[in-house]
Image (tube, rainbow, N blue to C red):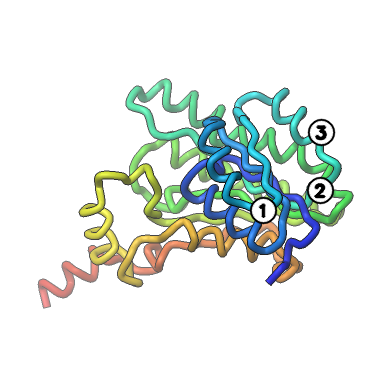
Amino acid sequence: MNRFEGQTALITGAGSGIGAATARRLAAEGARVLVTDLDEEAARTVAAGLPHATPHHLDITDRAAIDRLIGGLPALHVLVNNAFVPFVDDPDENWRRQLHGTLLGAVHCARAALPRLTTTEGAIVTIGSVNAEASFGDHAYSAAKAALASYTRTLAAEAAPLGVRVNQINPGTVATPSWSGRERELAALGTRAYPLGRVGTPEDIAAAVAFLASSDAAWITGTTLRVDGGLLAVNSHFREILGEDA
């Protein structure tokens, strides 16, 4: 498929994990991809393996830098808000970082991109988390991701008359580099918590992004799509206890 032939896609946090997989997927379908990341070397590494891809250093907390990058593009068809702030230990600092980075970083990118996307009837896809819908730890991260889901809905209403679609994906556990060294835990999560018997891969999420960003989803906006291996559909712990008591 070449659903993105002739289109330009900007992906934040594309130096590794879900962002890198999304860059590869959209490039494989014909897109010119802007691989952006706070780690410029990682962005360069990803972009080097793709046709028509360019790496860019981008700090999503720097609104002026976002405006410069997006404002300088000839056209923009797809924005993938993937970058987020990793967990940190200090609770107060974590709240500041998550609200300023994970939440407002995506808001700044969307604000800068929307005028460009209106001219191409483009799409915004934001990467959320199942943490937005249930308790899996880290209050600040979860609250920021839940706020993104609300922002997705309100922005979708604003953008729809302009021809721009806005959606969010809430992944479950995904085997990204942040889990390096914890492979046994990942395997245990997959078999014990996920009905489909495994945790996700970055490619699983990239496939969902490609769908929501493409014309195949032309009548979908304001939605949050769970890509979680059935995690939130089944209470595995409850079923396990019920089985033990039966």
Question: Which of these two is toward me, 244 or 60?
Answer: 60
Image check: 88 left or right of 46?
left
Residue under numbered circle 1: 51
Secondary structure beneath dot 1 equals loop
Q: Position of residue 246 (x, y in %)?
A: 12, 78
Mark toward the start of the polypeptide (2 vs 3):
3
Image check: 175 left or right of 192?
right
Residue under numbered circle 3: 71
User: Mark 2–mark 1 contact, CB under 8 Å?
Assistant: no
Q: Tell me if residue 99 comes above or below residue 243 in the rendering.
A: above
The total number of labels drawn is 3
Q: Residue 62 has which mark?
A: none
Mark toward the start of the polypeptide (3 vs 1):
1
Q: 10 Å neighbourhood of mark 1: few (<14), some, or many (≥20)?
A: some
- The answer to which quarter of the image holds residue 10 is top right
Type of amino acid under label 1: Pro
Residue under numbered circle 2: 117
How far separated are the C-alphas under marks 2 and 1?
A: 23 Å
**Circle 2 or circle 3, nearest the eye:** 3
